[in-house]
Amino acid sequence: MFESSYCHRHHISPTCACREDGGTSSSICDDALNAACEELGCDESRLVRRKRLEQKRQLEIDEAQEPAIYVGSVATGDKVMKSAEDRDRIANTEGIIAFEMEAGGVWEDVPCIIIKGVCDYADSHKNKKWQDFAAATAAATMKALLERLPQTESGMMVSYESI
């Protein structure tokens, strides 16, 4: 995760306008949005050091890959969050632990538990590098949750209304 004020834009291209304008999240060119940090020259010294990740680096590989489950308020919307500054402001004022857009509004129609796999930091440095891992983690978490639900004699799960 990069510092909130550090935008994913052309840092090494001498010709792109998004390099020259200070790189606000609203002025990042389409080419930059679809490019990897390595291609744009994003400065890894601007990465935020986090104790949790430093601790995981000290673990054996099996322990380090164990998923973590967080429970809390998740903001939902109809647009992808690409501004780290907006993300941090909303998270701090509203007590939000994550942002998502796929399950938005479903709770209004169907009482449910939403399980999400996190694959990016809701900022301009988005990429799909961790998307498959996040999806597999969410699927495994859902499977583990379903295995804990009581079942009827026929093997069917008990509905939420009868629990």
Image (cartoon, helix red, strand yellow):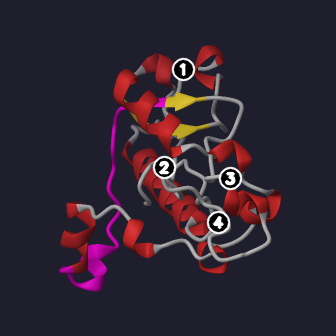
* Secondary element at tag 4: loop
Q: What is the magenta segment's predominant secondary structure?
A: loop
Q: Is residue 115 above or below residue 91?
A: below
Residue 44 pos. (x, y %): 43, 74
Residue 153 seen in the current view: no
The amino acid type, in three-letter code, at marker 1 is Pro
**Label 3: how many residues lie within 10 Å, few (<14), some (14-19) or many (20+)?**
few
Q: CA distance from mark 3 to mark 2?
A: 45 Å
Q: Can you tell which of label 4 and label 2 is closer to the viewer?
A: 4
Q: Earlier in the sequence, mark 1 or mark 4?
A: 1
Q: Earlier in the sequence, mark 4 or mark 2?
A: 4
* Image quadrant containing the N terminus: bottom left
In this picture, residue 141 sits left or right of residue 66:
right
Q: Residue visible at 67% across and 41% down? A: 80
For label 4, the residue is 128
| Label of residue 21 in the image | 3
For label 2, the residue is 142
* Secondary element at tag 2: helix
Q: Which of the 4 image quadrants contains residue 136?
A: bottom right
Residues rendered magenta in the picture: 58-74
Cβ–Cβ below 8 Å for labels 3 and 1? Answer: no
In this picture, residue 25 sits left or right of residue 155:
right
| Label of residue 111 in the image | 1
**Label 1: how many residues lie within 10 Å, few (<14), some (14-19) or many (20+)?**
few
Q: CA distance from mark 1 to mark 2?
A: 16 Å
Cβ–Cβ below 8 Å for labels 3 and 2? Answer: no
Residue 103 pos. (x, y %): 63, 34
